[in-house]
Image (tube, helix red, strand yellow):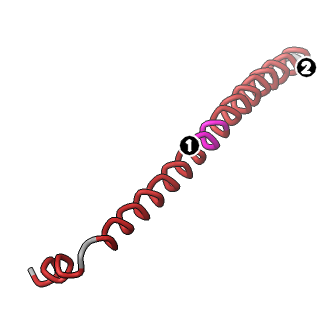
Amino acid sequence: MSNQTHIDQIAERVERLLLRYHELQRTNALLTTQVESLTHERDTLKSRLQAARARVEALLDRLPQEATVQKEST
């Protein structure tokens, strides 16, 4: 195998590796954006859940004491 052919093969392989590297960088950037979006969505849902729990607890606190005792004994 001639020296030039060997260099050409190496150059071609380096080009393919560079293309793959850039492709992986783009994929990583997209995935990072997706993770950030999902993290924000999760945090929003957790906040809404916490607010809903607080509202339910406030409603339960407003129930008459006898109704609470009756429910606990059943």
Instruction: Please state if 60 lies on the left or on the right of 73 as rendered.
Output: right
Instruction: Please state if 72 lies on the left or on the right of 26 as rendered.
Output: left
- Report which residue position mark 1 lands on: 38
Q: Gap between marks 2 and 1, in whole Å?
A: 52 Å
Locate the N terminus by quadrant. Answer: top right
- Magenta highlight range: 33-37
Identify the secondary structure beneath mark 1. helix
**Above or below 1: residue 22:** below
**Above or below 21: residue 11:** above
36 drawn magenta: yes
Task: Indicate which disc residue 3 carries.
Answer: 2
Q: Position of residue 16 (x, y in %)?
A: 75, 22
Instruction: Please state if 39 lies on the left or on the right of 29 as rendered.
Output: left
Q: Position of residue 44 (x, y in %)?
A: 54, 48
Instruction: Please state which of the two labelled residues, at mark 2 or mark 1, is closer to the viewer.
Output: 1
Report crowding for label 1: few under 14, some 14 to 19, many 20 or more residues within 10 A (C-alpha): few
Q: Position of residue 33 (x, y in %)?
A: 66, 36
Overall secondary structure of the magenta stretch? helix
The amino acid marked with disc number 1 is Leu
